[in-house]
Image (spheres, coloured by chain):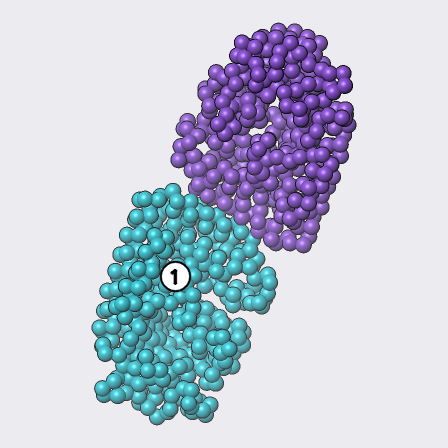
Chain colours: A purple, B cyan
Amino acid sequence: MIDLNLLTDGGVGWLDASGPSSHLVLSTRIRLARNLSSHVYQGRNSETEREEILQSVERAVRESVLLRRPTRYRLDRLDRIDRQLLHERHLVSKELAGLEAEGRVRSGASVLIQDRIGVMLNEEDHLRIQGLHSGFALDETYAEVDRLDTELGQRLAFAFHPEFGYLTSCPTNVGTGLRASVLIHLPGLVLTKEISKVLQGLAQVGLTHRGLYGEGSEVVGNFFQLSNQTTLGSSERELLDHLGKMVRQVMDYEEQARQVLVRDAPTVIEDKVWRAYGLLRYARSLSFEEAMNLLSGVRLGVGVGLIPDVAMYTLNKLLIYTQPAHLAVAEGISPDDADLPLRRARFVRKVLESEVGRRG
Amino acid sequence: MIDLNLLTDGGVGWLDASGPSSHLVLSTRIRLARNLSSHVYQGRNSETEREEILQSVERAVRESVLLRRPTRYRLDRLDRIDRQLLHERHLVSKELAGLEAEGRVRSGASVLIQDRIGVMLNEEDHLRIQGLHSGFALDETYAEVDRLDTELGQRLAFAFHPEFGYLTSCPTNVGTGLRASVLIHLPGLVLTKEISKVLQGLAQVGLTHRGLYGEGSEVVGNFFQLSNQTTLGSSERELLDHLGKMVRQVMDYEEQARQVLVRDAPTVIEDKVWRAYGLLRYARSLSFEEAMNLLSGVRLGVGVGLIPDVAMYTLNKLLIYTQPAHLAVAEGISPDDADLPLRRARFVRKVLESEVGRRG
C-alpha cells in the first residue's frame, strides 16, 4: 500500500479552495506531451526501450531544480487499489493507471510528483509534464509547467519539428502538446437547462468538455472539465488566453444563471439545496454518484449563500475521500465491498457533523 | 373562526398515542347510524324537517348524562375553512362538512361533541352516534358509544324493524347501523409488497379498507382505515369481535413484515427511515402527501427502534397539524396559499428541532 502522505499536502493541496474563483473552479490542470527523439513512440516501443526512457528522464531530473526531490510511483509495480488511489487524486491519468476498460498498466508507467508539478512517464507519450493548481489559475499553472519543460528540455532531446512543433504519439497533440483543463462546477446552468447551449458554443470555438475524471468520463455532480481541443496552429499563450477568456465567460453565465434561480425560484432552489444537505446528513447508504450529486446541491447552496455553515474545502475533501479507492483504503476494506455505500454515508455524516460542531 | 380549544384536548386527545398498540394503531372509531321514526330519511326531507330533527335531538341531549355539556358546531353556518378543520380533526365526516366533490353542506348539518363521543346530525342519517379512542380500543369505544345510544334511544324513537334492525338512509347500513374503523399504519406490509394480498384477504372476510379520511379517500403515508363492510345479519358483538380478530391478525402480519425487513434488509430500511427524517429536518417545501409519506418512514423507524429521539405523539401531532386547514389557520393564511408547502416544511422543522432539543 502506498503512502500518499509522503506527498506535500497529501497531493491534494490543489483542493484547498484557496485559488482564484474557487467557489466555481475547483482546479486548473495543464499538461505538455513530450517525446524523446531518440526513441519510437509508445505502442510501438519495447519494455527495454521504456526502461531506457525512464532512466533518461531520471538522469535529467537528478539535475533538476524544480523536481529535485520528487515522490516516485512505478504504476506497473503497484496494486490496482494504489493505482486507483493515484488516479482518484487526479495525480495520474486513467490510462497511466491502467484503469480503462480492458486496460492494462504499460510496463515502465511511472509518475514523479513534487508539490504542484510532476511528470507522467510512459503514458501515451514518453513524458507528460503536468501541473495542478487550486481554483482558476491558468497563468500560474502554465508558468510552473513551462519552467519544468524548459529545465527538462535542456537535458533531454524532445522530438520537435520546426514546422509542426512538438511531435506526439497521437496526432491530435502535435504542436504545443498542451492541454489545459479547468474543473468547473456549473449547477446553475444545468438547473436552468442552459448547459447544452453553452457546451455547444464551447465546441464551436474549439473547446471540449469532459467529466470529473477526464477523457471518456461522464459528468457527475455538475462538474465539468473544460479544455482546449486542438494543440496545433496556435502558440501556448494563444491557447491559454482563448481558454481563459471562454472560461471567464462560462463563469459569468453560471453566475447569471444562479442569480436567475435565486430571483425567480428562490424557494425551489432553497428546498433543493437543503434537501441535498439533509440527505447527506442522515442517509445510511450513498453511492458515489449520488454523493456527488448531493454535494453538488450543497456546494450550490454554499455558493449562493443559502447554506452558511459548510466550507468549500470540506466539500472538496468529501469529493476526493468518498471515492471508492480512497474510502476503501480509509476503511480497510476492498473497493468492491458491498459495505462501501454504508461506509461512505457514515463518513459523510461524520464530516458534516464535525463541521456543524466546529462552526456552531 | 371556530375555536377548537373549547374541546377537551382540542378534540385530538385520541392522538396522544396512549391507547393499546398505539405504535401501529392510531385510533379506533365507531359510529352508529340512527334515524327518527317520526321523520323521512335525508335526501327526501325538507329544511324544516331537518330543523325539527335538530330540536328533537337537542331535547334528548339536554337530559343526557354523557352529552351533558357538548360543544356544538352547526356546519351549515360555518365557513369552509372551519368545516375543513373539523373534518381534518376527524370530528365530522367529509359529507357532513360538505367537502365532497361538488358537495354542499346540508342545512341543519351539525355535530355535538363531548370528550371522546359525539353525534353528527343531518348527515346521511338523522343521527350518527360516534366515538373515537386512541390506539386499538374497540371494546372501550363501543362501550361508550353503546351507552350514548341507549341514553338517546330512551328519549328518541329510532326507526327500528323487528326483523332487519335499525333502518337507515342507505341500505348498506341497515341492521346494527354500526361501522367500526381502525386507523392502522402498515409500512412493513407495503414495503414487503404483501399489502395487496392482506387487503384481498380482508375483503374476503367482509372487511374493507379506506384512506386516512374515510370513504373515497386515497391511502397516503401507509395509513389504512380497516372497517366492517356489512352491518346486517350479525350482532354488534359479532361484528366487533370479527373486526378485532382480523385487525390483530393484520398487526401480527405487520410485525412479521417489519422483522423480515430488519433482518433481511437492515441497511435498506435504516437508510430509508433516516432519509425520511433528514428530508423532514431540512426540506424547505413539503406537500401534504410527501409529508405524510416521510412521516410514515420516520414512524416506521421509531417503531422498529432505529430512530430513538422522536415520540409517536409528536408524529401524530404532525399528522394533524400539517393538514391544509390546520396549517393555514395556524399560519393565518388561506389553505390555497401558494406558501403553504413552505410553511408546512418550516412547521415540521421546528417541531422536530424542538424534539431534538427536548430529548438531546
Closer to us: A112 or A115: A112
Q: Position of residue A334 (x, y in %)?
A: 41, 28
Q: Quadrant of the N terminus of chain B?
A: bottom right
Q: Is residue B224 left or right of residue A86?
A: left
Circle 1 sits on which residue? B223
In the rendered structure, the residue with mark 1 lies on which chain? Answer: B
Q: Is residue A326 visible?
A: no
Q: Position of residue B87 (x, y in %)?
A: 45, 71
Closer to us: A198 or B276: A198
Q: Position of residue A15 (x, y in %)?
A: 60, 29
10 Å neighbourhood of mark 1: few (<14), some, or many (≥20)?
many
Q: Is residue A22 left or right of residue A351?
A: right
Q: Residue at x 39, y 35 (%)?
A: A338
Q: Position of residue B141 (x, y in %)?
A: 30, 70
Q: Is residue A234 above or below residue A304?
A: above
Q: The disc labelled 1 sits on which kind of residue? A: Phe
> Is disc 1 placed on a helix, strand or loop?
strand
Q: Residue at x 52, y 23 (%)?
A: A97
Q: Is residue B34 left or right of residue B339?
A: left
Q: Quadrant of the C terminus of chain B?
A: top left
Q: How many numbered marks, from 0 up?
A: 1
Q: Residue at x 33, y 48 (%)?
A: B261
Image-quadrant location for residue B173: bottom left
Closer to us: A271 or A50: A50
Closer to us: B140 or B357: B140
Q: Residue at x 28, y 63 (%)?
A: B201
Q: Is residue B57 above or below residue A298?
A: below
Instruction: Name, please, the residue furthest toward the front.
Output: A44
Q: Is residue A196 visible?
A: yes
